[in-house]
Image (cartoon, rainbow, N blue to C red):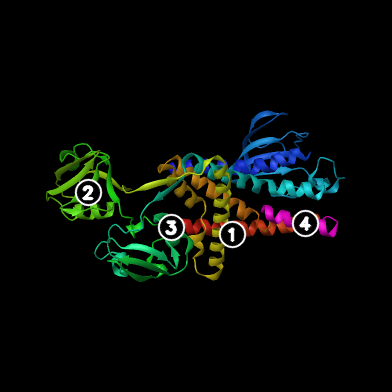
Amino acid sequence: MEYIIYFAITIGILVFVHEFGHFAAAKLCGMRADVFAIGFGRRLFGWNKKTGFTLGELPKDFDGEGHTDYRLSLLPLGGYVKIAGMIDESFDTKFADKEPQPYEFRSKPMWQKIFVITAGVLMNLLLAWVIFWGGNFFQGKQVTNTTAIAYVGKGSTADSLGFESNDKIVSINGVAAKDWEDVRAELYINTLGEDVNVKVERDGKQKTIYVPRSRIPDDERQLYFLLPQGTRPIVLEVVNNSPAMKGGLKANDIVLSLNNIPQYSSAQTTKIIKSHAGIQLPITVKRGNDTLHLAVTPGGDGKIGIAIASIFTGNVKYKTYGFFGSIGKGWQDIAMMTDLTFNMIGKVFDGKIEFSKAFGGPVKIAQYAAKSADSGFSTFMNFLALLSLSLAILNIMPFPVLDGGHLLIIVIEGIIKREIPVKIKIAIQNTGLILLLLLMAFIIYSDILSL
């Protein structure tokens, strides 16, 4: 249910912003916008100045006389603005047999048509920029001021590759690492689909470790592949009358050692607890400014009754940019993410990245939306910005049904100085819609398989 709620919020915001761009541009250019819909398919309910609020479909011969019907439709996977005199997803061609009216899309000059078609993409770019600007101005960029690895467990993936605790990462594929954000970017994002060579400093000497891409988890939190020095397990919640409560543990305790072994990740702590059912374990925690030495005895099921996660306790700095500096930094973030997106698409076509790992549908969006919301408001907003930017990039591609497909038709008509026949436009739209539906079905199928 949480996934559904956050999916609805995320898609609702993105679709509204995108379609409002088309709607506002059409109005500014003197065009009629007959429908402003969130969702596709059957009209559930809506409002317009002529009929007021109504449930269900409007009569087939309904004429809003220039008034927009604002509606919510059955399928919550997008939305549309129906602009008079335009061949779009509604496939309405009734106007084609009549003389062009001054308020119709087809009667407007080429520059106005381009403005209206691209306005949705521009609004998505603007939303992404505003969020990036706000994040840079109000919060700044967090810098985890270390490149040293906290802990490499015996038998772990990192151990089998040759990493050791306290290794300092110097560079990845020749790109210097100044902080853990550089490590994260190069290891999990910029080198997607590629094997990597990680240069580390150990005991004053440098060593290069070859890491096949297949050994790097898709999610950096998965298997706790490499953790920055300063990472510790933290107790999020203690169950009433549990072994943890009886042992004196409290929420927000940071675990320093367990069974006299220094602790660096929640996975490490959980493994020790599970393997010592019924055996009392000494545990040292930091509570505020105090260090406490306690003891806890896991139950017969190998649990002590806590929710646990990992937290970074080392040196963190926030790089701020100021009001005007944040303006430029916001556009830099957009340029960087756009370059990364096209780079990823290129790697999909090259076969370096699986299609299902590069693209996600409703299921993945719902998952990531819920996870980002759980991580805090700023994380959710950053996810929303990235999704808005992705929507803008994909929508401007010259594919039928998408804004880029409409833009291509407008440009072609401008070059040949006449309209493409309605039958051809309908055929293009139908073909594009079928291909898009097949693609969506495949993406949803891939999403379900990855659950």
Q: Which residue is mark 3?
A: 182
Magenta-colored span:
401-419
Sequence order check: which comes first, mark 3 or mark 2? 3
Q: Which residue is mark 2?
A: 256
Q: Position of residue 217 (x, y in %)?
A: 39, 61
Report if residue 1 is visible in the image.
no
Residue reaching furthest to the front: 204
Marks 1 and 4 sit apart, C-alpha to C-alpha, by: 27 Å
Q: Residues within 10 Å of mark 3 (few under 14, many from 20)?
A: some
The residue at the point 27 percent across, 40 percent down is 252
SS of the residue under disc 2: strand
Q: Main secondary structure of the magenta part?
A: helix
Q: Position of residue 98 (x, y in %)?
A: 86, 45
Q: Decide: marks 3, 4 in contact (CB < 8 A)?
A: no
SS of the residue under disc 4: helix
Task: Specify the amino acid type for callout 4.
Answer: Val
Q: Is residue 180 left or right of residue 203?
A: right
Q: Decide: marks 1, 4 in contact (CB < 8 A)?
A: no
Task: Specify the amino acid type for callout 1.
Answer: Leu
Marks 2 and 4 sit apart, C-alpha to C-alpha, by: 64 Å
Q: Is residue 126 above or below residue 268?
A: above
User: Magenta includes 14?
Assistant: no
Marks 3 and 2 sit apart, C-alpha to C-alpha, by: 27 Å
Q: Position of residue 363 (x, y in %)?
A: 48, 51
Q: Which residue is mark 1?
A: 438
Q: Is residue 18 left or right of residue 173?
A: right
The residue at the point 48 percent across, 42 percent down is 6
Q: Nearer the viewer, mark 3 or mark 4?
A: 3
**Residue 188's quadrant in the figure?**
bottom left
Q: Residues within 10 Å of mark 1 (few under 14, many from 20)?
A: few
Marker disc for residue 54: none
